[in-house]
Amino acid sequence: MIDMIKEYELYLRTEKKLGDKSIESYMFDLNNFITYFNGDVLNLNKKDIEEYLHHLRSGLSARSVNRHISSIKGFYKYLVEEGKINEDPSEETSVLKIEKSLPKYLTIDEVDKLLNFETKTAFDYRNKAMMEVMYASGLRVSELVSLDYNSIDLENSLIRVKGKGKKERIVPIGDIAVKALTVYMEEYRPFLVKKGRYDELFLNNHGKPISRQGFNFILENIKEATGIEKDLTPHVLRHSFATHLLEGGADLRSIQEMLGHENISTTNVYTHVVNEVLRENYDMYHPHAKEK
């Protein structure tokens, strides 16, 4: 069995071209699976597989169980192709259904409260520009911190963004974000530039590009200073951007383009958020919403 596992690991690396982390995950799952059955996994049946998955469900999330299922099914498919077994006991095994949680977002009043923080220093004005751009464009934090100085078109209120897979997209921004960027870029960024000049727009106190961790730290400090009680992450700002656009009547395809989503189904989750808000408002205000 040990030789068979090594052969499978080699197959994943050379034939499937998987990376080290993916292979490590597959091997971790398979070793647990093999250990559970004391090394005898060549003579299992469907019932055995179901027993093992029941064992996993007692301690793991549905998402984690599905990863184990994928690892097991991939292994058995390989064994069948190699002629080491005749039938795949995992063939009829289905992944678990995962309930998608709706994105968390801020209300418009909460966003106004968050963005209305005091600005005194160059760092405050940098933070103001970052926050306004995040809410105005729905960027991922990785996209925000990698923005180039020359990717900002203030005259036309546009920014050029390098997204996932190094794909570029053009995203519009509003007047408030343009104003915050103009003040930062013209009056305060020059004070942050040190000897080792960088092209990135947003710089830290050492004159180097802001990191993702650095932005998260800044965001947490602003949250505490402004008294926002909800959990707040860069993704919450991104969700707020999309939700508020959709609530205002924006086209879903346009939001998809601005967010840089490959598939419209990813963007479609925001319709569920808006529909939920509409339902709450209906139940609250329509006189015949609930029987008295």
Image: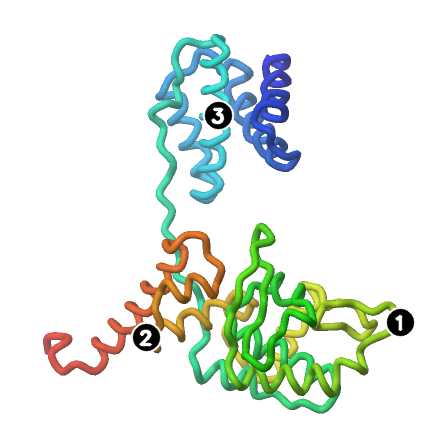
Identify the residue at image location x=37%, y=64%.
270
- Tag 2, which secondary structure? loop
Q: Are marks 2 and 1 in contact (CB under 8 Å)?
A: no
Q: Amino acid at mark 3?
A: Gly
Q: Residues within 10 Å of mark 3 (few under 14, many from 20)?
A: some
Q: For residue 66, which quarter of the picture?
A: top left
Q: Amino acid at mark 1?
A: Lys
Q: Residues within 10 Å of mark 1 (few under 14, many from 20)?
A: few
The residue tagged 3 is: 74
The residue tagged 2 is: 249
Q: Position of residue 34 (x, y in %)?
A: 54, 21
The residue tagged 1 is: 195
Q: Are marks 1 and 3 in contact (CB under 8 Å)?
A: no
Q: Position of residue 27 (x, y in %)?
A: 60, 28
- Tag 1, which secondary structure? loop
1 vs 3, front mark:
1
Q: Amino acid at mark 2?
A: Gly
The answer to whether 89 appears left or right of 212 in the picture is left
Identify the residue at image location x=66%, y=79%.
127
How far apart are the two marked residues, 1 and 3, measured between alpha carbons? 53 Å
Q: Position of residue 6 (x, y in %)?
A: 64, 18
How far apart are the two marked residues, 2 and 1, measured between alpha carbons? 47 Å
The answer to whether 130 appears left or right of 76 in the picture is right
Q: For residue 235, which numbered disc appears in the image?
A: none
3 vs 2, front mark:
2
Of the image marks 3 and 2, the number of the one nearer the N terminus: 3
Of the image marks 1 and 3, the number of the one nearer the N terminus: 3
190 up-or-down from 74: above or below? below
- Tag 3, which secondary structure? helix
